[in-house]
Image (cartoon, rainbow, N blue to C red):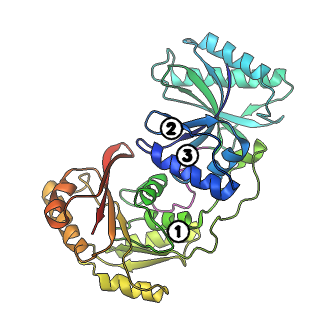
Amino acid sequence: MIVNDLRIVGSTQTNVVMIAELKRVATRALKRRLDKEPKKEGLGQLVLPFDRDLAWAATTYMRTPTRVLWDIARSNAERLEPLYDDFFNDLLEDQRPLWHDGDGISVEARRIEEFAAGERQIVGTVKNAIIDAARRRGARLHVDPDRPASRWVARLDDKREVVLSIDLGGGSLSQRGWRRDAGAAPLREHLAAVLLVLARFDPRVDTLVDPMCGSGTIPIEAVHAARAMPRKHHALAGLGLDRPAEPLFADSSPVVIGCDYDLEVLGAARDNARAAGVTKDVTWQRADVTTLKPQVIADIQRERGREPGPGLILSNPPYGERLDEHDLRELYGAIGHTLRGFAGWRAGFIVGTPLFEQVLYPIIGEPRIKKPLANANLRAYFYLYEL
C-alpha cells in the first residue's frame, strides 16, 4: 500500500520534546504553524502527513530527533515473496520522484526481529523490489553502501506491518560530523539537545555551564542550538527537497562554559569545538566540579560581556559504569555541596542511577522535574533542580 507520511524518530520518552521543537522550527524556518498536531507513535516517534517544506525544515533544523523519514509504502506480508510483490507493485505504480537514473541506493532493516526471515534476506528482497520497479519505470539504480543518493529503511511497526521509508537525513542525525574525540562515556548529540529543551535553556539570558564537560557535547550543542544552525544533507538534494539554509538566529551570542579537571580532556573538547566551528563561542575552564565556585563563573561572564547572574548548569556525570557505589556517593555529595553555592541557578543532570537523587535530596532537596530517558542502552533519568 502506497503511503505518504513524514516520520520523526527520537529516543524513548522524547515525543513531547520533539513536538515542541517541530512547532518552533515551523514557525521560525517556514513562518507558519503546523497544519495539524503530529500523531504520537510509541514513546519516541511522531507521524504527520508528508509536507515537502516541513520535511526540509525538520531535517535541516531539528536537533532532538535521531532520524527523519519519508514513509513510502507499507506491507502486511509475512514472507519474503509477498513482501517483494507488495513493494515492487507499489513502487511501479508510484509516480513520485523517488530516484534519478543512475542513482546509488542503500537499504537497511530495523526492528525486524519478529519477521519470518533474517535481516540480510529482508534487505536483499527490498533492494530487489526497488531496483526492479525503478528499471520498469526507466531508471537504472545500483547499490552504493558508502555514498548512496538515497538510503531506504524497512522496519516492522507496532502493527507488525513492514514500512518502507527514505531516510531524509541519510543516516543518524545524532552524528553531527564534528566529533574527533568521544571521550570515555560520550553523550549522544541529539540527547544533549533534548536536555537543553527540558532545562528550558534560553541563550538570551542563561549562561550555560557544564562542570564535567568531557568531550564537550553539551557546550557545543548549546551554541548550535542557540543559533539554530542548519545541517546540509545530500539526500534532500537528490529528492528535490533541498534549498538554501541559514542559521535562524545568526546573531545569537550565547555565554557557554565547559569545565573539566583533566587538561587532556579539555584539549579534546577544544578539538571538537574547532571541528564544530564554535572555537570562539565556548570558554573552556580547568576546574573540578567538587570545588567549583560561582566567582570563577562570574569572572568569565564579565569577560564575555554579560553581567554576573544565575544561569543553567547542565551535565552528564558518571553513574556506575566506571565508579563503585562508595565513590559515586562521594562524588554526588560533593556535587550537591557545590550546587548550594549557585543560588538562583537551575541545574540539570542525566544520570542512570537513583543514587544521585538519594544523595542530593538532603543537600538541595527534590528535583522540580524527574523524567525517564534512555542514554544509549542505559535507562536514565533527567533531573532538574531549582537552586
Numbered disc in front, either 2 or 1: 2
Secondary element at tag 3: loop
Tag 3 and tag 2, C-beta contact below 8 Å: no
- Residue 204: x and y in percent read 51, 73
Residue 4 occupies which quadrant of the picture? top right
Q: Give the CA separation, mark 3 to mark 2.
A: 14 Å
Side of 147 where 255 appears, left or right: left
The amino acid on which the numbered mark 2 sits, given as a three-letter code, is Gln
Residue 179 lies in the magenta-colored region: yes
Q: Label 1 to label 3, Cα distance in Å?
A: 20 Å
Q: Which of marks 1 and 3 is in front?
A: 1
Relative to 293, say whether 355 is above or below: above
Label 2: which residue? 45
Q: What stretch is highlighted in magenta?
A: 171-181
Q: In which quarter of the image is residue 277?
A: bottom right
Q: How far apart are marks 2 and 1 (CA)?
A: 26 Å
